[in-house]
């Protein structure tokens, strides 16, 4: 067994430490607004959707594919749910099932483009993402649709456990499920090899195409689940605001891959990354910085995260 | 021959890699307008010599003179252009998706740039003129992907000739590095007439090949390399085929008895390959007995290296039937996943891209083939996985025997032993090896041979080993099947499985093929 080197431990928990430092700094600067229970319950509660969307990215990223359609799929799912529930008077349960199936359908189509037609996933999902955004505008007449069943809103944001809305726990639970699949099921191991060495996986008898396709379907399903939470959070569905979640989700996924299990896209790291980013942004906003700081923060974090993991990889390559 | 008359003269060129001497005091003169052959078996130093000229390798010692003028060694990569040299390598260096014209002018479009940018019409016209000058008919506007193999080779040679003449230099040296390997016979003829014209016009040609008949047909003189040294430079017209083979293999070629064996053992035939055809082999068939290690070999272009991949489904076979212990497998429909289920395993030649993921742990790499076994219905039993991996690493003497290390941290030999461990766990009935000891040090080689032989004998595993390392085949195999141009030529068994015998048959396979074509 190799001894855990200080550098490895430091790398593993660097992001958590940075998060702690951020909290302390803002706590000193804004003790009465930042260091309050309500501020932290807001931070934890409000970002569950970003957590879910980030988690949606992990299966395809691990398999070596990008899914740029997660935010659009989420928006579509929320819109389908709203239209069925409000305009067509479907029960909320049936509308949720339909919204989730829509996500599966998007994943199936993405998978077909990537696996059967051998289109680069970046291009295929860039196309499908734009297409879906168009469909959303079309079916909604570019209108926000409000009046979603209160029972959904209750279980998403109104009901609380330890003062935090339930949606927070949904995100955490999903992260644990993904952790279980990635680390404790054979399919997770296979998926990792598909992403790292496609040829190795193929020659080891792994069904590479099936796994890549499956990863995209799962990503569509989780995105759709994000859509259900989104509709529940807002009590309505609007056709465009969800799209802005795409970049923050990628930033969190890549930043998450530098922590907890450095070098791998991992759910716990991703969740930590989301909350680190959001804490930073909330703190800056409390200091009175304008909203453009969000974009600076997310954009910068994405590039920084990728740069960090490159450096770590180089260090490991030269050290090994 | 004095330096002054040679277009290119190499003197006492030596180069070693680690402990092996790849080139030893090699001298070589290429005369103006001469087609000079460079012959030798794999590992004789041909490619090292070419790479010194191309500036890839730095020689340990030696002199280079061009037109009598001393050129300081080592050359920088690409510097050969300054001295009128041009290379056509086996892969030709063409971009398939671009047009003939774009490939031809890859470095030289600026010649016709007018004030208004590139005139493609004028470029096409010039390209046609160029092709006409060489007597080659090619349409400049079609993409290279639409060309036949021979047309691609012609394009590459025309481009190289143009490169030589670009700086108003009349002559130069054209280096052709195994240009005919993928060409059909009639294609070779067209290529040769182009080479002859170039030589007649004053260009010197260095023709590197393993193909004795082609070398005899096209060259004026030939230098033969053996074990990194110059075994002799001869005038082609005055040299018999037998003499060439003697120079290549360093001794006389014995008469060729029919070596096809009757029946090797009393053990039953339990693996059968019939009518196997792929991209470069056709109608290959052989049988294997339980516990037998069968080698597949041949010269470059003979197609033997394709066989393991066809049998594993990692390259598409056109036809073929495989039967293992009586159960038939339809080879053209085979996928690697189905092959693994049918009891096959393949250890690919390229460990880095096909065999393993260097950044993941040894444990993950080794366990991948049997990962399903560790799922206890609820959790992946990581502890058992690690324990098994550690035990396997000890059993296969992988050092260090630490399953948590990144796979890339192991040496080549230990990496290969770990891959054997990975696949032996699946208890394959038929193990396919593709160049199993590439990049493996000598000590580990012996161990790998022993592991394979023991597994074959003790577990009754069938082993197919495709290799161009004749010494390895002699050490490892019960029987060696020699390929010539995509077909089975001979099988060597028992006392005939020696390095010399295998080399001899590789060349004999080629000579016989050539004879058939003439008839």
Image (tube, rainbow, N blue to C red):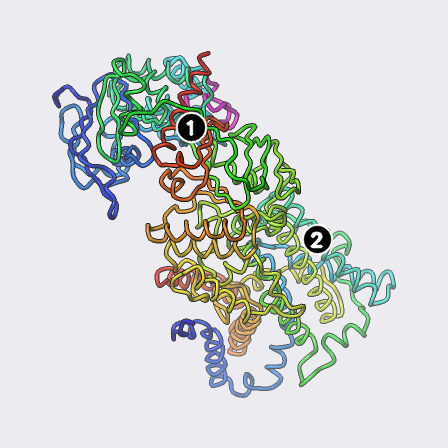
Q: Under tag 2, what secondary structure?
A: helix
Q: Is residue B377 placed above or below B127 in the rendered structure? A: below
Say few, some or many: other residues with alpha carbon within 10 Å of mark 1 (under 14 / 14 to 19 / 20 or more). Answer: many
Instruction: Using the rendered image, report if marks 1 and 2 lie on a common chain.
Output: no
Where disc 1 sits, the SS reads: helix
Nearer to the camera, B73 or A21: B73
Q: Can you give x and y, in whole percent of width and height, for residue B306 in the image?
A: 50, 36
Label 1 marks a residue whose chain is B
Left or right of B4? Residue A222 is right
**Which residue is situated farthest in the bottom direction here?**
A32
Q: Can you say which quadrant of the picture contains the N terminus of chain B?
A: top left
List the residue tagged with mark 2: A106
Res. B497 visible in picture: yes
A80 or B255, which is in the foreground? B255
Residue at mark 1? B103
> Mark 1 to mark 2: distance in Å?
41 Å
Is residue B141 highlighted in magenta?
yes
- Viewer can see residue A126: no
Residue at image position (50%, 23%) is B147
Residue drawn where x is 65% and y is 38% of the image: B330
Q: Residue B249: percent from the left, percent from the top?
A: 30, 29
Q: Residue at x 39, y 14 (%)?
A: B129
Total of numbered circles in the picture? 2
Q: Which residues are magenta?
A: B138-156
Residue B108 against residue A134 in the figure, above or below: above
Q: Residue A265 placed where, x, y %?
A: 54, 63
């Amino acid at each position: 067994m190799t001894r855990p080197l200080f550098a490895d431990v430091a790398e593993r928990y660097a992001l958590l430490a940075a998060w702690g430092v951020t909290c302390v700094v803002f706590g000193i600067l804004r003790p009465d607004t930042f260091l309050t229970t309500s501020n932290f319950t807001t931070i934890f509660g409000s970002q569950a959707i970003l957590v879910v969307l980030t988690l949606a990215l992990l299966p395809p990223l691990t398999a070596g594919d990008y899914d740029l359609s997660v935010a659009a799929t989420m928006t579509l799912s929320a819109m389908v749910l709203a239209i069925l529930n409000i305009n067509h008077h479907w029960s909320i349960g049936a509308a949720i099932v339909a919204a989730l199936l829509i996500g599966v359908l998007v994943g199936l189509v993405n998978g077909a483009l990537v696996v059967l037609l051998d289109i680069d996933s970046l291009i295929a999902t860039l196309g499908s993402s734009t297409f879906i955004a168009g469909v959303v505008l079309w079916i909604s007449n570019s209108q926000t649709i409000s009046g979603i069943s209160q029972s959904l809103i209750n279980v998403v944001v109104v009901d609380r456990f330890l003062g935090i809305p339930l949606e927070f726990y949904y995100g955490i639970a999903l992260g644990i499920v993904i952790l279980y699949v990635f680390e404790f099921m054979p399919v997770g191991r296979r998926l990792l090899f598909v992403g790292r060495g496609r040829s190795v996986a193929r020659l080891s008898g792994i069904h590479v195409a099936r796994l890549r396709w499956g990863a995209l379907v799962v990503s569509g399903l989780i995105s759709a689940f994000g859509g259900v939470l989104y509709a529940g959070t807002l009590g309505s569905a609007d056709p465009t605001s969800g799209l802005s979640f795409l970049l923050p989700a990628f930033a969190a996924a890549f930043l998450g891959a530098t922590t907890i299990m450095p070098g791998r896209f991992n759910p716990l790291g991703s969740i930590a990354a989301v909350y680190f980013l959001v804490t930073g942004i909330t703190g800056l906003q409390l200091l009175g910085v304008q909203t453009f700081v969000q974009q600076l923060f997310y954009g910068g974090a994405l590039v920084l995260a990728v740069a960090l993991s490159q450096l770590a990889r180089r260090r490991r390559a030269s050290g090994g | 021959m004095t330096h002054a008359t040679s277009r290119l003269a190499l003197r006492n060129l030596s180069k070693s890699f680690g402990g092996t001497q790849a080139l030893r005091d090699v001298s070589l003169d290429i005369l103006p307008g001469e087609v000079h052959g460079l012959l030798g078996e794999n590992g004789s130093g041909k490619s090292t010599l070419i790479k010194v000229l191309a500036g890839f390798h730095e020689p340990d010692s030696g002199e280079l003179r061009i037109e009598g003028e001393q050129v300081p060694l080592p050359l920088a990569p690409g510097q050969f252009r300054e001295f009128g040299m041009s290379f056509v390598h086996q892969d030709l260096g063409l971009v398939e998706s671009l047009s003939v014209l774009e490939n031809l002018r890859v470095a030289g479009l600026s010649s016709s740039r007018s004030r208004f940018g590139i005139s493609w019409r004028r470029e096409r016209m010039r390209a046609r003129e160029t092709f006409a000058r060489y007597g080659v008919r090619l349409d400049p506007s079609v993409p290279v992907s639409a060309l036949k193999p021979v047309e691609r080779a012609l394009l590459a040679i025309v481009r190289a000739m143009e490169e030589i003449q670009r700086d108003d230099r009349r002559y130069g040296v054209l280096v052709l590095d195994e240009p005919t390997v993928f060409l059909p016979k009639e294609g070779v003829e067209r290529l040769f007439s182009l080479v002859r014209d170039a030589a007649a016009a004053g260009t010197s040609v260095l023709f590197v090949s393993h193909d004795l008949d082609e070398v005899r047909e096209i060259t004026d003189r030939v230098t033969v390399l053996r074990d990194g040294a110059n075994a002799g430079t001869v005038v082609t017209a005055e040299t018999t085929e037998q003499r060439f083979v003697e120079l290549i293999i360093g001794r006389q070629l014995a008469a060729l008895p029919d070596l096809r064996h009757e029946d090797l053992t009393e053990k039953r035939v339990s693996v059968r390959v019939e009518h196997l055809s792929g991209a470069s082999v056709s109608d290959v068939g052989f049988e294997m007995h339980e516990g037998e290690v069968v080698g597949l070999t041949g010269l470059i272009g003979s197609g033997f290296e394709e066989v393991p991949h066809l049998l594993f489904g990692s390259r598409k076979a056109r036809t073929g039937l495989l039967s293992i212990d009586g159960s038939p497998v339809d080879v053209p429909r085979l996928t690697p996943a189905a092959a693994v289920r049918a009891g096959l395993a393949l250890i690919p030649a390229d460990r880095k891209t096909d065999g393993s993921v260097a950044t993941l742990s040894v444990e993950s790499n080794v366990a991948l083939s049997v990962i399903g076994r560790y799922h206890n219905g609820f959790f992946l039993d990581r502890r058992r996985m690690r324990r098994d991996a550690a035990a396997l690493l000890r059993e296969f003497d992988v050092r260090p025997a630490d399953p948590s290390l990144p796979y890339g941290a192991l040496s080549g030999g230990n990496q290969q032993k770990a891959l054997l461990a990975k696949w032996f766990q699946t208890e394959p009935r038929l193990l396919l090896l593709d160049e199993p000891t590439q990049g493996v040090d000598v000590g580990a080689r012996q161990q790998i041979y022993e592991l394979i032989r023991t597994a074959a004998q003790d577990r009754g595993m069938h082993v197919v080993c495709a290799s161009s390392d004749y010494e390895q085949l002699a050490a490892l195999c019960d029987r060696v099947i020699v390929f010539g141009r995509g077909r089975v030529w001979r099988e060597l068994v028992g006392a005939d499985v020696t390095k010399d015998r295998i080399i001899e048959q590789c060349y004999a396979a080629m000579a016989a093929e050539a004879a058939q074509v003439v008839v």
